[in-house]
Image: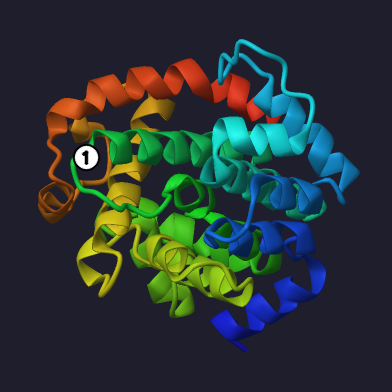
Amino acid sequence: MAPSVEGLVENCSKLISLPEVAIRVNSMVGDPGVSAAEIGEVISQDPALTTSLLKIANSPLFGLSREVDTVSRAVTVLGGKQIRDLVLASSAADAFKGIPNDMLSMENFWHHSLCCALAAQELAGLSRIRKIESVFIAGLLHDIGLLLIYNKVPELAVESIMLSLDQSKALSLNQAERQVMGFDHAQLGGALIKAWALPESLQACVTFHHEPAAAESHKVEVALTHIANSIAHLIETDSSSLDNIQIIEPAAWLVTGLSEEVIKDVIASVRDKVTEMQAVLKMGG
């Protein structure tokens, strides 16, 4: 019997979920009536998350002149959205630590995901469009559906990979997945994001990161995630040539107001940050 998106997500939801603290922080950050102290109080209910967050806040990544010794101080100094992103990043990595994926190096998976997250954040900063929703978490979780596929239906994952490698078919991996399973890892990941009750913008970015023109909403955020994914692949192949990656849709550049000229600078910025960020978030174990 062929797997379904609903079945895989339901199965996954029984095994892993984001902690209540992460979900509460996500909703609190968007509320102007919530103070830094209140957000800090919620995070402090999780000792492990508190320790992780303070370690990140005091890392050279942020270059703060004074030591941050409380979570509420971290929220004040770094800002609510930055803290939310770090909380969700740490929680997502922890959520999947207990899920074995023999087909996949988790260190490589999170390295690519973090490169995409940092690239998306950098691109958003370079774009002149205002009121862009946070794309760091979108970049981090864009391939989360792959973890479910590799873990739950590894034989179909292999079949999809082999089909995508067949040059006579000229299919990308997500196109091959649709032929084999009827859906792809992006659609599956988007469904998981929805099940976790995370923002609609995040769901759109994950679902359409391979085909941004298909997104009906949050088009800028989706386009940024799409471009960032390709830049992450360039970093992995130690290249800056677009000939070495899946084509970036021209409409994505148009919608973000950016051009290919930003790629080299974004690659350089991400390379400066990614190793330390992966270490402090303890991704890959």
Residue furthest to the bottom in view is 1
Query: Which secondary structure, mark 1?
Result: loop
Disc 1 marks which amino acid? Ser
Q: Quadrant of the C terminus?
A: top right
Of 146 and 125, the residue lying toward us: 125
Q: Is residue 221 above or below residue 111?
A: below
Q: Position of residue 131 (x, y in %)?
A: 30, 53
Pointer 1 local density, CA inside 10 Å: few below 14, some 14–19, many at least 20: some
Q: Is residue 54 above or below residue 89?
A: above
Residue 185 visible: yes
Horizontal side of residue 171 vs 144, given as left or right: left
Q: Is residue 197 above or below residue 44?
A: below
Q: Position of residue 49 (x, y in %)?
A: 80, 42
Q: Quadrant of residue 264?
A: top left
Instruction: Name the residue rendered at 78%, 32% in the picture.
Output: 70
Instruction: Name the residue rendered at 37%, 41% in the picture.
Output: 120
Horizontal side of residue 118 vs 168, given as left or right: right
Colour convention: rainbow
Q: Which residue is mark 1?
A: 127
Residue 100 visible: no
Of 168 and 274, the residue lying toward us: 274
Q: Position of residue 149 (x, y in %)?
A: 60, 64
Instruction: Name the residue rendered at 46%, 53% in the picture.
Output: 138
Of 74 and 225, the residue lying toward us: 74
Q: Position of residue 238 (x, y in %)?
A: 37, 20
Instruction: Name the residue rendered at 62%, 89% in the picture.
Output: 1
Of 186 and 253, the residue lying toward us: 253
Residue furthest to the top in view is 65
Q: Is residue 157 above or below residue 137?
A: below
> In the rendered picture of this protein, how many numbered marks are placed on residues?
1
